[in-house]
Amino acid sequence: MEKQGVLNNKNIVGSSLIHKLSMFVVLFGFWMVLSGRTETKFIVYGLITALLTTWVTYPLLLVPNKDGGKQYFVFGVSIPKFIMYFFWLMWQLVLANVDVLLATTAQELDIDPKVVRFYFRADNPMASVVLANSITLTPGTVTINVTDDGLYEIHALTKGAAAGVLDGSMQKKVADLYGEKFDFAVAEGEE
């Protein structure tokens, strides 16, 4: 069996050359910002360092899907979509903070902790990681478990947090971010 190189691997989703080029540009830009120097010597050091780092780390930044038939670049998202998702998530954090604040500072403690479950399936494993981490980052919710078949178990502190997890809006945003088909369903027995 012949070993395939990363450059000619047909299992990689997207163009490996574009992935490497964008990674190189970001690393070189980061070098220039941190060094703050524009002398030729520092530019050459930055180019060499960014090139070597890209060459060495690119294979480490490829993650296989569940069946191993495809490999996805970890940072393979559209920058404009990522920016839109970031600002949407920040707004969700504000809303969740207000929900938890009102629930915990009310005269009568208004918390109703429960575990809610839903299914979200995506071929790109990074979509699952981003969804689980986005839920955990949101105040009032913690991702407890994600199974191989796409079942998410989430601990929700309030009724509002549980409803927010089960409405599918975050799942839809993550699916759009990664160009995945929206495959979401509330698990049986959940409101």
Image (cartoon, helix red, strand yellow):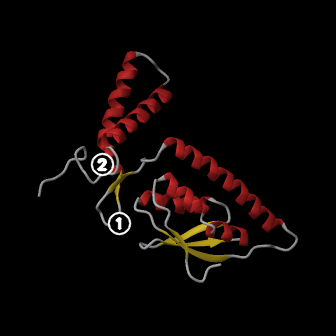
The residue drawn where x is 67% and y is 56% is 92
Q: Quadrant of the C terminus?
A: bottom right
Mark seen at residue 104: none
Disc on res. 59: 2
Foreground mark, 1 or 2, reads: 1
Where 66 falls versus 52 (above or below)?
below
Q: Above or below — where is 145 with respect to 6?
A: below
Q: Which numbered circle lies on residue 66?
A: 1
| Extreme residue in the left direction | 1
- Please give the name of the residue rendered at 68% of the width and 70% of the height, measured from the top-left corner: 163
Rendered view: 63 above or below 80: below
**Image vertical order of residue 37 relative to residue 180, above or below:** above
Residue at x 28% of width, y 61% of height: 69
Q: Assess disc 1: are there few (<14), some (14-19) or many (≥20) residues with their C-alpha within 10 Å of its C-alpha.
A: some
Q: Residue furthest top?
A: 39
- Left or right side of 35 for 83: right
Q: Amino acid at mark 2?
A: Pro
Amino acid beneath label 1: Lys
Badge 1 or badge 2: first in the primary sequence: 2
Q: Position of residue 68 (x, y in %)?
A: 29, 63
Local secondary structure at mark 1:
loop
- Quadrant (top left/top right/bottom left/bottom right) for the N terminus: bottom left
Image quarter of residue 97: bottom right
Distance between the alpha carbons at the discs numbered 1 and 2: 18 Å
